[in-house]
């Protein structure tokens, strides 16, 4: 998927060893995430262009979140996949998560997860999703009674905010640690993010 190429040119790599001949069917959507296990606000000194929606806004703040999910919803496919949403925004998935059942993600901008439900919408390519599509998917989620997390749940997993120079530093120092903790099967992502600039496997910003 094009959207799995981060704006700084870092690819979300899938190990050939993870490939399987039997791809599970796409579950019905809308479908809520199973749980929220980590929340941390962040700010970037240098923002990046957000490729996970059609309008491509600049992002210099947001929320890092880790969600427990149905692995079949995030299974790699050579086709459109269920898009992850939070409130009125698409969510940038930073790993696959189909082996671990955990997705590490960025929700751009200011978001209150006690008011914004998090769910998987109909299969699509995130870079084709615009405000109109998001409104349609939100209506479907509301009709399916998908609700936001309770405030006490969010507070129980909230971490101190962090600041980074740019997305590359956020990946190396903070998101990498989340991958190692929640989805260690994808250690190759961490190794790629931590390559020195200009080395094979990592594009210069």
Image: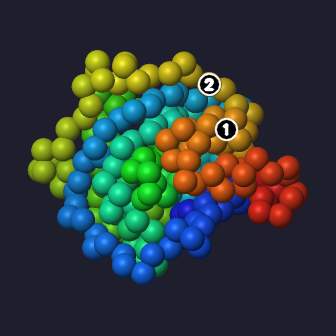
Looking at the rendered structure, the secondary structure element under dot 1 is: helix
| x, y percent for residue 34 | 28, 44
Vertical relation: 195 (above or below) 62: below
**Image check: 175 left or right of 91?**
right
| x, y percent for residue 131 | 37, 54
Q: How is the image coloured?
A: rainbow
Q: Are discs 1 and 2 less than 8 Å apart at CB?
A: yes
Q: Nearer the viewer, residue 142 or 170?
A: 170
Q: Earlier in the sequence, mark 1 or mark 2?
A: 2
Vertical relation: 185 (above or below) 124: above
Q: Nearer the viewer, residue 161 or 49?
A: 161
Mark yes or no: residue 57 visible: no
Residue at 67 percent across and 49 percent down: it is: 190
| x, y percent for residue 21 | 42, 81
**Displayed quadrant of residue 118:** top left
Looking at the rendered structure, the secondary structure element under dot 2 is: strand
* Residue at which label 2 appears: 162
| x, y percent for residue 10 | 69, 58
Q: Which mark is residue 170?
A: 1
Residue at 62 percent across and 64 percent down: it is: 13
Mark yes or no: residue 170 visible: yes
Q: What's the distance in space between the residues labelled 1 and 2, CA to CA?
A: 9 Å
Residue at 63 percent across and 51 percent down: it is: 187
Q: Residues within 10 Å of mark 2 (few under 14, many from 20)?
A: some
Q: Nearer the viewer, residue 89 or 36?
A: 36
Toward the bottom, the furthest residue is 21
Residue at 49 percent across and 41 percent down: it is: 182
Q: Residues within 10 Å of mark 1 (few under 14, many from 20)?
A: some
């Amino acid at each position: 998927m094009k959207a799995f190429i981060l704006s700084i040119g870092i690819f979300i790599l899938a190990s050939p060893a993870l490939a399987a001949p039997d791809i599970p069917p796409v579950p019905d959507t809308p479908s809520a995430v199973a749980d929220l296990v980590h929340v941390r606000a962040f700010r970037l000194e240098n923002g990046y262009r957000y490729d996970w929606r059609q309008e491509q806004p600049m992002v210099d703040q947001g929320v890092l979140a880790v969600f427990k999910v149905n692995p079949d919803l995030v299974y790699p496919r050579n086709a459109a996949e269920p898009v992850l949403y939070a409130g009125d925004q698409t969510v940038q998935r930073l790993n696959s998560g189909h082996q671990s059942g955990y997705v590490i993600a960025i929700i751009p901008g200011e978001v209150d997860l006690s008011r914004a439900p998090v769910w998987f919408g109909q299969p699509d390519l995130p870079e084709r999703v615009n405000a109109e599509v998001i409104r349609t998917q939100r209506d479907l989620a509301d009709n399916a009674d998908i609700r936001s997390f309770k405030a006490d749940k969010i507070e129980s997993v909230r971490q101190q905010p962090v600041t980074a120079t740019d997305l590359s530093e956020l990946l190396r120092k903070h998101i990498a640690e989340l991958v190692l903790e929640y989805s260690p099967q994808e250690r190759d992502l961490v190794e790629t993010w931590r390559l020195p600039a200009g080395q094979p496997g990592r594009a210069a910003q």
